[in-house]
Structure formats: structure tokens, C-alpha cells
Amino acid sequence: MAPVNAAPQPVWDIALRKRLRQGDSVFQIDLAFLSHARRVVLFGPSGAGKTQTLRLVAGIAAPDAGRVAVAGRTLFDSAQGLNLSPQQRRLAYMFQDYALFPHLTVRQNLAFALSRGLRNPPRGVRSDAVDHWIDRFDLGGVAGHYPHQISGGQRQRTALARALVSQPAALLLDEPFAALDKGLRERLRDELKALQTTLQLPMLVITHDDDDVRALAEDVVCLDAGRVAAPAR
Ligand SMILES: Nc1ncnc2c1ncn2[C@@H]1O[C@H](COP(=O)(O)OP(=O)(O)OP(=O)(O)O)[C@@H](O)[C@H]1O
């Protein structure tokens, strides 16, 4: 039982050390941050190490040392020899280019996130969860379309819906608005913020755009050269 007056657990408790080597070049990630905010933005210039950090949190790559705990669940702890697989972590990862399957329809892309096997879901696949997110993101009219047949905003919504359909414990978003034009970017930022507020889902967003920080961040962590940097004034 938690002691009386115990401090609330942080939503994000991250400490990562990782040495990345490619040929002669080495990039070192050595950072730690702790936040009680659900909506955290990792902000930094190109090459700061944001994507690599997100990959380490997601479990796509393993840190050399450190700790990853999200919403009170420890996902990685080198001191304890704990390293949950990406599936066990239940963190949805939305890639910068959305990584939708081009040969699957919007509906199949969502259903794929629920299918455990390697087989593609059939075109007419039915599922309450898929229907719910298709409705929620207003994708009903394009559910049978392929990614190249829908707009950039619809692609972004499809990727977000696919991330949410498996009921993740948290959402990791890599530059979620980078591929969109300005007007759409503003609208979808508002939508994402409203969605997160409704779902109360922990969300870690990486960006190099200060408009994303202003619009989305309850808390911001600035990164530079693989480390946490003081915010620019
Ligand atoms: N395997 C690797 N070995 C060595 N360096 C690497 C490796 N993978 C990535 N890097 C380097 O790590 C640095 C950080 O890359 P990362 O993609 O995390 O940056 P970023 O902050 O997400 O940038 P951007 O905003 O441009 O996507 C880059 O300088 C990159 O070249």
C-alpha cells in the first residue's frame, strides 16, 4: 500500500544511455527527465536525438543503461535486468511518415493493428473497435480507400486511429504534423489535444516546431546533442 502523503508517481520517468555508432561516427544519448504531465513534448533541432530517444522508450532499440517507466509501469530497468518487448510495453508509436500499409485499405490498416498474425485482414473485416475509431476520426467515407487515395489529413487520422485501436497505455508521436500544410496542421493540433484531454492518455510528442510546443505541451523537455538542454529564452 502506498504510504500516506506519498508523492504522486510521475507519468514519465525516463533515463537513457545509449551509444550509437555508424562507421566512424558516434552519437551518444545520455539524458533523464521526469514529468507529472500527461502531454509532454520533446523539443529540439534536427539531429538532437529525438527519434532515437523515442525508439528507446518504445523498445524498438535497447538502451545500454537506464530506466523507462510510464504511468507507473516499469518497462525497462537495466539495474533490474528488465526489458519488456515493444508488444508488452503497449505503447503506440506513430511514425513521422505514418508508415501506413500501402496495399491495405484504411479499414484494413486499422484492423491490422488488432491482428496478431502475419496474415492481412480481409477487405470487409469487421470489428467494433475498428468501427469506433473510423467513426471517431470521421473516416467512414474513405474506409475502403487505400492510403494513396486519401488526403494528408485523412492519412494522419488513419495513422492515429491505427495507433489507438489496440488501446495502448500511451502514445508516442514522431513529428505528427510535419507532413501537413499549415492550416491543416493547426486544425489537427487542436484535434489531437482535444482527443488526449478526453482519453487522458499519456502522450509523448517529438518535434522541432515551436508551434507544436505552444499548442500541445503541458511540459516540455528540450534536447540537444543527445542531452537535456536548458530551454531557449
Ligand atoms: N546507428 C547510428 N549510429 C550513429 N549515429 C546515429 C545512428 N542512428 C542515428 N544516428 C545519429 O543520431 C543523431 C540523432 O538522430 P535522430 O534521428 O534521433 O535526430 P532527431 O532529433 O530526431 O532529428 P530530426 O528532427 O532531423 O528527425 C543524428 O546525428 C544521427 O545521424
Image (tube, rainbow, N blue to C red):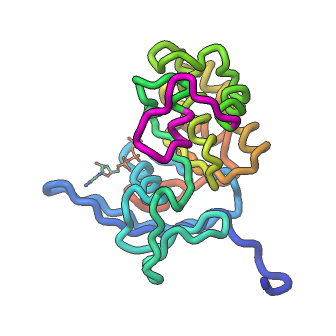
Q: Is residue 117 magenta?
A: yes
Residue 186 or residue 69, whichever sits in front: 69
Residue at the left extreme of this rendering = 24
Is residue 222 shown above or below 199? below
User: Residue 76 location, x and y as percent?
Assistant: 49, 70
Q: Nearer the viewer, residue 93 or 33?
A: 93
Tell me what residue is drawn at x 50 percent, y 72 percent: 67
Determine the residue located farthest toward the right in the rendered image. Answer: 4
Residue 111 point in image, percent of width and height: 55, 35
Residue at 57 percent of width and 36 percent of height: 162
Left or right relative to 127: residue 225: left
- How many marks are shown on the rendered structure? 0
Identify the residue at image location x=76%, y=77%.
7
Residue 87 percent location from the top left of the image: 49, 56
Rendering quarter of residue 185: top right
The region drawn magenta spans 110-128
In the rendered image, is residue 208 in sight?
Answer: no
Tell me: 20 left or right of 228.
left
From the viewer's side, name the closer residue of 93 and 197. 93
In the rendered image, which quarter contains the N terminus?
A: bottom right
In front here: 103 or 115? Answer: 115
Q: Tell me, yes or no, whether the highlighted magenta stretch contains residue 160.
A: no
In the rendering, at what x and y percent does residue 149 appear? 49, 13
